[in-house]
Amino acid sequence: MVSRRGWVLFALMSVLWGIPYLMIKVAVGEVSVPVVVFARTALGAAVLLPLAIRAGNLDVVRRHWRPLLVFTAVEILGPWALLSDAENRLTSSMTGLLIAAVPIVAVALARLTGDGERLGPVRWAGLLVGLAGVGVLAGPHLDGGSGWAIGEVMLVALGYSIAPMIATRRMQDLPSLQMAAFALTIAALAYAAPAAATWPETVPSGRVLFSLVGLGLVCTALAFTLFFELIREVGTSRGMVFTYVNPAIAVVAGIAFLNEPLTGTIIASFVLILGGSVLATATHRSSDRPSADQPQNTPTELAEAAQTQPRHHPSEHDEPAQA
């Protein structure tokens, strides 16, 4: 039975990792991609790094610096830049729905690498239905710049699927807080120079500044902290159910605040992708054990925080709709 506190945390996480697409869309309208990524990672690191240092376990971080670098590359460095660039041409709601295919990609990768369970008829049906949903959504936009942007989002989905495999295979004894804090710090340092080189000559508008601050402090730092609490409260499998709500939040936010269209194609793809994700990961819904093909979303942003030493990683994109 989920407690009232658990439901509150569930609702907060559904929103906090459903709105990054809206904020990214607003931000890239006035500032460069490196500035967006740097602002998000630097603000997130500024909050989480002191907490990680205070918590200790720094020797564990040093022992895992190589896989941590790879993890940061496929979870943040590449995906957050690709995602931001793609939203120069795609709507925020469409981007959120495409990222919702992450669980489907993760299941397929786990199967290909021999790390997943045998796929029964239900899970195969989930994979096919989810991929059909991606096709329905992306098909009409494959020409020109939109086609390139869709390819970028699919690379993001691939990165979000590979990152938890690295975390579970190479960094199981690295606590989630330390993993998130140092990954964000590495990414902020990597994007500092490109951000400085493309820094806007004039101060961006208030809505853009609000979006950048929101991405860093709310959708990254606060969201990670609340996610740890959610997992402690209800367990990993129950906690991860919120990832199926994120795409709906992304679509609603885009329609409400950016006047993005709600078309029959979006509705059909939403049903197919989310339905496919649920079916493809159905056998993992009852276990609290983290798995490489478990649904993820993003930070940026997938994680498991156990009572004493969390093992899995949090991310912006820990959701099918994470950014």
Image: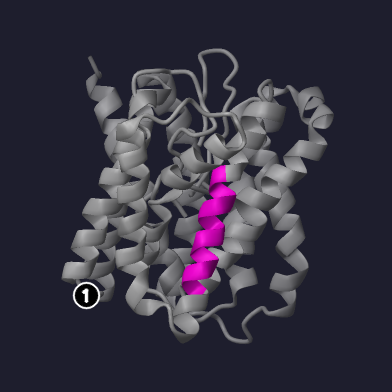
What amino acid is labelled 1 in the image?
A: Pro
Residue depicted at 16% across the width and 69% down the height: 264
Disc 1: CA contacts within 10 A as few (<14), some (14-19) or many (>=20): some
Q: Position of residue 17 (x, y in %)?
A: 39, 48
Q: Is residue 42 left or right of residue 154?
A: right
Q: Is residue 25 left or right of residue 55?
A: left
Quarter where residue 197 is shown: bottom right
- Vertical placement of residue 101 versus 203, above or below: above
Q: Nearer the viewer, residue 47 or 169?
A: 169
Residue depicted at 37% across the width and 48% down the height: 16
Q: Nearer the viewer, residue 144 or 108?
A: 108
Q: Nearer the viewer, residue 141 or 208?
A: 141
Q: Position of residue 204 (x, y in %)?
A: 51, 79
Q: Is residue 173 left or right of residue 152?
A: right
Q: Position of residue 111 (x, y in %)?
A: 53, 35
Q: Nearer the viewer, residue 209 or 9?
A: 9
Residue 295 in view: yes
Quarter where residue 270 is shown: bottom left
Residue depicted at 71% across the width and 31% down the height: 53
Element assignment for label 1 = loop
Residue for badge 1 = 261
- Vertical placement of residue 50 versus 59, above or below: below
**Magenta-colored span:** 149-161
Query: What count of labels does the image hold?
Result: 1
The residue furthest left is: 264
The residue furthest front is: 121
Majority secondary structure in the magenta region: helix
Residue depicted at 37% across the width and 45% down the height: 127
Residue 163 highlighted magenta (yes or no) = no
Residue 151 highlighted magenta (yes or no) = yes
